[in-house]
Image: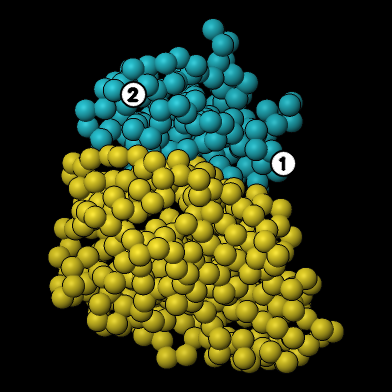
Chain colours: A yellow, B cyan
Amino acid sequence: MREFTYVRAAGVGQAVAAVSADPGADYLAGGTTQLDLMKDGVLEPDRLVDITRLPLRGVRLDGGTLRVGALTTMEELAADPVVAARAPFVREALLLGASVQLRNMATIGGNLLQRTRCRYFRDPSVPACNKRRRGTGCAALTGAARMHAVLGASEHCIASHASDLAVPLVALDAVVRVEGPEGERTVPLTGFYRLPGSTPDVEHVLGHGELITAVDVPLPPEGTRSGYLKVRDRASYEFALASAGVSLLLDGGVIREARVALGGVGTVPWRAREAEEVLRGAPAGPAAFREAAEAAVRDPFTVPGTAFKVELAKRTLTRALRTVAGVAS
Amino acid sequence: MTTLTVNGRDYPLDLDDARLTLLDALRDRLGLTGTKKGCDQGACGACTVIADGRRILSCLTLAAQCDGRAITTIEGLGSGDRLHPVQEAFVRHDAFQCGYCTSGQIMSAVCLLAEGRAGSDADIREFMSGNLCRCGAYPNIVAAIREVARDA
């Protein structure tokens, strides 16, 4: 790991000023991605500004919106009774991610900003990675691509976004609250991430020095059911090959409202609005579910290693819809 | 300089290098080598310690972040010559082979029990999944934890 200096921020404004003023500075929160990638030599900041003791921790219900402080840990949010009661798929996504130890460290803000698990991105001895260095190529296209994306991918990058939590959060239209050198702003999570295109090194809309202070989660109407299904190579403590976050509001056997997002298969947490349109107003059953799955995974970009994920994603979503709707297979 | 509070005792610590992890501080500066370094990247759980009552990975925690926090390591579990009940159960059930992951397994199991997540074998397996055992002692680890949970 390259040497760096450590400073502890005394306040949000001071932290933002310190990082904004220094192109070589990064924030340090839970550290579970940051320090890991620094040990790998992928990230090499000159200075870490530790924000872990800033007052950005805790969950508060404000009307129909849950305001989650950016430094709330994954375990803390998973234990929140409002999350469990009103948006169970958020809790499920949290508890299916990482391990208890990592969830006690990792923060909600950091979770949204976690970096891809692409093995070529994480290995600086591999020269070809457009995400690490624009214009160098993509080793995953011809390499071992199993954990990679089929939606939103391009010939420049097929790295997937690894967050489970972000899947239900994009489905719920969560809003990211950001503090920056110019003051506060809000960004809808569905517009927060950028598709790789020809600039995979640009992953989100935040500028250097901007700090996530909270995430606002609009709670779905009472009576909404939800679920998160994660398919992976190991039964626990593993990233998704494919996952689906689904919420449904049913009226008799008819779907009144549907929210659908996919994980493990997208370069960004993948909101599937086309699937939602198919489901809205349709009778809850296998025909609508399969049609929705077809709509969700349209125009995939595949390489030999990821071709299986197209059908896997469809089946994952179909099964999640069946489970949430309570419809027998 | 900073102070680490480990197993109820204050240790002065020279933070000459910001890269110093809690794990390396425990092992190389404080001489508390019960905490093990496995992958050193947050993947194996061998370095699990308890900070302010919660299990964390000491390899992905900077020592500089730890002043004022109460750290407990495997050396702080028992009292005098008496082992902690989870340590006793691991011995009784032969819940290890090479032993390298064991201190992390035990620290994690102590927290698992405190978290109330040892209700079934499936729960024990799920909530211990951050601790890998390359010898494959899992059945006996689960048996040891199950016994402590039952006797609690």
Q: Residue at x 65, y 38 (%)?
A: B115
Query: From what the image shows, is residue A36 above or below residue A196?
Result: above
Q: Secondary structure at mark 1?
A: loop
Q: Report whether A313 appears left or right of A67.
A: left
Quarter of the rendering occupied by the C terminus of chain B: top right
Query: From what the image shows, is residue A276 above or below residue B19?
Result: below
Q: Residue at x 33, y 17 (%)?
A: B12
Nearest the viewer among A97 and A201 is A201
Nearest the viewer among A11 and A46 is A11
- Return the residue found at the far front: A182
Residues marked 1 and 2, same chain: yes
Query: Which numbered tag is attached to residue B2?
Result: 2
Res. A12 in view: yes
The residue wearing badge 1 is B119
Labels 1, 2: front one: 2
Nearest the viewer among A260 and A174 is A174
Counting residues from the start of the chain, the first of labels 1 and 2 encountered is 2
The numbered mark 2 sits on a residue in which chain? B
* Alpha carbon separation for disc pair 1 and 2: 40 Å
Answer with the quarter of the image where residue A83 lies.
Answer: bottom right
Q: Judge the density around disc 2: few (<14), some (14-19), many (≥20) Cα neighbours within 10 Å.
A: some
Q: Amino acid at mark 1?
A: Gly
Q: Amino acid at mark 2?
A: Thr
Query: From what the image shows, is residue B149 above or below residue A297?
Result: above
